[in-house]
Amino acid sequence: MSQTLEQVIQSAGNLVDFVRNQQVGPNVYPGVPSEFSNWRAEQWAWGHTAVLYNQSYHMVDLAVKGPDAYLMLEHLGINSFKNFQPDRAKQFVPVTPDGYVIGDVILFYLDENHFNLVGRAPTIEWVEFHAASGNWNVTVERDERWAMRSDGRRNSYRFQIQGPNAMKIIEKATGKTPPELKFFHMTRLTIGGKEVRALRHGMAGQPGFELMGPWEDYGAVHAALVEAGKAFQMALVGGRAYSSNTLESGWIPSPFPAIYTGEALAPYRAWLTDNSYEAKCSVGGSYVPETIEGYYTTPWDLGYGPFVKFDHDFIGRSALARMAAEGKHRTKVTLALDNEDVMRVQSSALSNGDRAKFMEYPSAVYSMHPFDQVLVDGRQVGLSTWIGYTANEGKFLTLAMMEPGFETPGTEVSLLWGEPNGGTSKPTVEPHVQTEIKAVVSAVPYVAAARDNYAEGWRTKK
């Protein structure tokens, strides 16, 4: 018999121990091979030629339709909806009544009274709950990710063409010069004889388009893109490299959903089931807070401070207004790990003595939500999240959130790598000892092209 998430929480005991010992590893990327060629070449291609990302499988899609769709989404997001209109998109971020992030997705404004949200499940579920429990004249349809279905199809395909040669490939595939679009604006193209909706986008600082359309057009559009890309050294990207591109672009892809506590959220936890994302997601790393709230993040922690607009009423508005007035926010940065320390950690795997936590290539993430301590003289001054290696930069990087006074590029810190007491019971964790890795606070995004080319106020330099 299934339980609600609230019942799971009540029986879990210590919630920090509960999420740290969940038997789930990092997010999976089904539907595509782990590598088409090799992950080093695939990383290199997105910075030097072009790549085709196949995003048709790993994200949840939610269609939201109806006369109140705009008003409901505006009520749930910290984002301004001023001048938001069809054929536009935005990074959509909802927060709890206490102002902590639930998740983030891409919100597509497709047509009048018709929206689509694409991303990880927490934000999708939050929108579904309000559609079901509020007085909104809306309908929602969830298109579940590939790992959770067995029918062999989805409502839509989703591809991205990115890299220095992306526009040449789009021109080859369409037979026309690509339209000049602002970031996150949309248009329609014809590819492989099929009408395709195209979003002006970028993932590692390079120009490109996200392309989408009905599932039955998948084969024709994909084949046309592959053929057009042959003349421009386009590489297909597998799941192994895909999860590491965020290190260069500076997007923290996995905010921990801040919904496990608070009386105001009890109805939501009672609506969620024991099969929900929140009932199964795992946390890993060296940071072990006293309470689950230690894993909660604000929009400023994630670099979403510019999204917070008080030009509309939304859930969490008063809490964020207080936070904004206090002005003491953590700052998102990149940490560039010391090469010699990384080699010391990796070489411990070749010894018969104590071994550090193994660092996988290219993504060293081993849970759904990684949290590692960032230290200065043994004192915690920040939290590291996503970690991995980029062949384009020849570095192990992490995306971190630093306390005020420690965010300046060039600041020397240490990453506490590995879990305490030999590690948790997650199947991705082997017995190991913790160790410190020297690191330097660096710009985010780490790649200069991303800092210069993204939309103002999103991931760009100030």
Image (tube, rainbow, N blue to C red):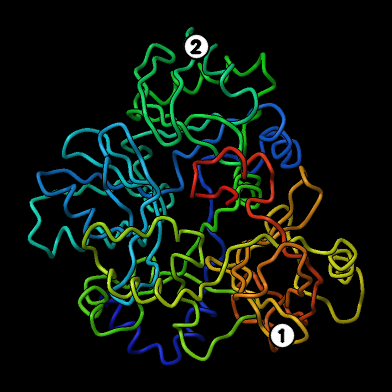
**Residue bearing the label numbered 1:** 422
Q: CA distance from mark 1 to mark 2?
A: 57 Å
Q: Secondary structure at mark 2?
A: loop
**Residue at the image position 51 percent from the left and 32 percent from the top:** 160
The residue labelled by disc 2 is 177
Q: Looking at this view, is 411 or 252 the one in front? A: 411
Residue 276 occupies quadrant = bottom left
User: What residue is drawn where x is 60% and y is 66%?
Assistant: 385
Q: Is residue 162 left or right of residue 397?
A: left
* Residue 145, percent from left and from top: 39, 49
Q: Residues within 10 Å of mark 1 (few under 14, many from 20)?
A: some
Disc number lying in front (1 or 2): 2
Give the number of marks.
Answer: 2
Q: Residue 248, how many percent across, how many down?
A: 66, 48
Disc 1 secondary structure class: helix
- Seen in the picture, residue 125 relative to 287 is either above or below; the reply is above
Q: Amino acid at mark 1?
A: Gly
Q: Is residue 429 left or right of residue 98?
A: right
Where 114 sits versus 175, above or below? Answer: below
